Amino acid sequence: MIRISGSDAISICGRVLKMASGRALKNCPVQSVRRAEAIDFSGNIIDDVLVTVFRAPRSYTGDDIVEISAHGGPVTLRRILTTLFGAGAHAAQPGEFTLRAFLKGKLDLAQAEAVADLIGAETETAARLALRQQAGALSRRVLVIREIILGVLALVEASIDFPEDVGELDTVYCFGELSKAHKTIEHVLKTADAGILYRDGAKIVLAGRPNVGKSSLMNALLRVGRAIVTPIPGTTRDVLEESFNLRGIPVRAVDTAGIRETTDEVELIGVQRSHEAIQNADLVILVLDSTDGWTQEDRDVLKAIGFKPHLVLWNKADLAIPRETASGELVVSAETGLHLDQLEEKLADLLTHGEVLAEDAEDVVVTHVRHREALKAAARALEQSLESLASGLPTDFVSIDVHGALFALGEITGITTGEDIISEIFARFCIGK
């Protein structure tokens, strides 16, 4: 698919496409598929294509759009693109189509970000959350909060500018409205930790001394034999990362070299990388051998994990059951799959802190760190405005804080977002979106 957007899109494509119907491209019906030949400037046929025209403003970008469906293959597509560039088109920048849609008011900034989220989603849950945001679930909630705050601001500004006409500010009413807005923000913020996790994913590191079954556990979680497994201690000498879907959470699982004292130069590098992986982990699984029980090496690994969130896991339950297990510890067999479902459930619970995402498509879930920080800033500004009202401070103080809350909320939808932030957001998009 080749997509061309802009005020000259139809005229540029008209120089390259020869419609099978014989009519000019500019006279073709909109939003209907028509057959055409793509022709280079020497009159040679490049490809037999299908063409769809979308007229402004009823298009994704708000400008005229022509979509050319060509046969796959880099040579054919490159020839068509080269001819289009010669006719006056230029290559799109990352996210330029969605940026144009944002600038034309077809999408707000939160909805535009959801486009990239949907493309990059690694699980069905992440895709479902992106669709909610693209449909405007968060934007609508922000709009409702802004309207409440704007209503209060109108009263505050009027009491400052026209005290003789409107009288004193109804502080009781304003306090109630701002409290309502604050409670709504706090309610939405409760979804942020889980929402960001389902969008961005997490890194889980398997750590332990050599030959406790870390690689076997890695393969069991992935449901594929990705890591090399042998009975020889120290088989894994480097970190190995693979992605898998953990109950809707995109997870990077990291298999590490066994941590122990060693004089082997290569193994020592692997041990050092294991320590680095632990420090960068969101959650560490300390793998123990059920046939051995706790050893000093196990305690050394636990000390290396430190205060990182971790789960103690006894492996090789098919060979032996540990004599004692503490609360929260799990017993599994990577070899037979025993209790792997319990392990996955426990890992998901630890990562989400027990938060359950709402299934209703209309419910708001915060999935971006940027949105979370903007909501926190708005909440802080509202708290300050409530304190000013309760303390009987001059109305000007209330006005400053209320303006601050509005500015923070506007950063979510793009009303008050700076150009540098907008440029950074769209730079993360892939070409053609």
Image (spheres, rainbow, N blue to C red):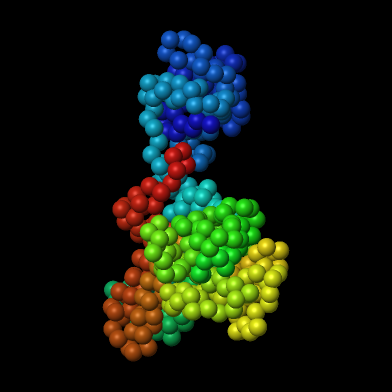
41 w.r.t. 27: above or below: above
Q: Position of residue 57 (x, y in %)?
A: 49, 39
378 w.r.t. 226: above or below: below
Q: Is residue 74 left or right of residue 160?
A: right
Q: Where is residue 150 in the image (x, y as percent from the top left)?
A: 41, 69
165 w.r.t. 81: above or below: below
Q: Position of residue 105 (x, y in %)?
A: 44, 48
Which residue is at the front of the view, 360 or 328?
Answer: 328
Which residue is at the front of the view, 273 or 327?
Answer: 273
Counting labels gives: 0
Q: Where is residue 62 in the image (x, y as percent from the top left)?
A: 46, 40
Q: In this view, does 424 lie to the left or right of 122?
A: left
Q: Is residue 432 left or right of residue 389?
A: right
Residue 277 image-quadrant placement: bottom left
- Whether residue 416 can be seen here: yes
Q: Which residue is drawn at 52% across and 39% down?
A: 58
Q: Is residue 361 left or right of residue 161?
A: right
- Whether residue 133 can be seen here: no
Residue 359 image-quadrant placement: bottom right
Q: Residue at x 34, y 70 (%)?
A: 403
Which residue is at the front of the view, 199 or 303?
Answer: 303
Q: Residue furthest top?
A: 43
Which residue is at the front of the view, 380 or 220?
Answer: 220
Q: Residue at x 61, y 27 (%)?
A: 33
Residue 130 image-quadrant placement: bottom right
Q: Residue at x 45, y 21 (%)?
A: 79
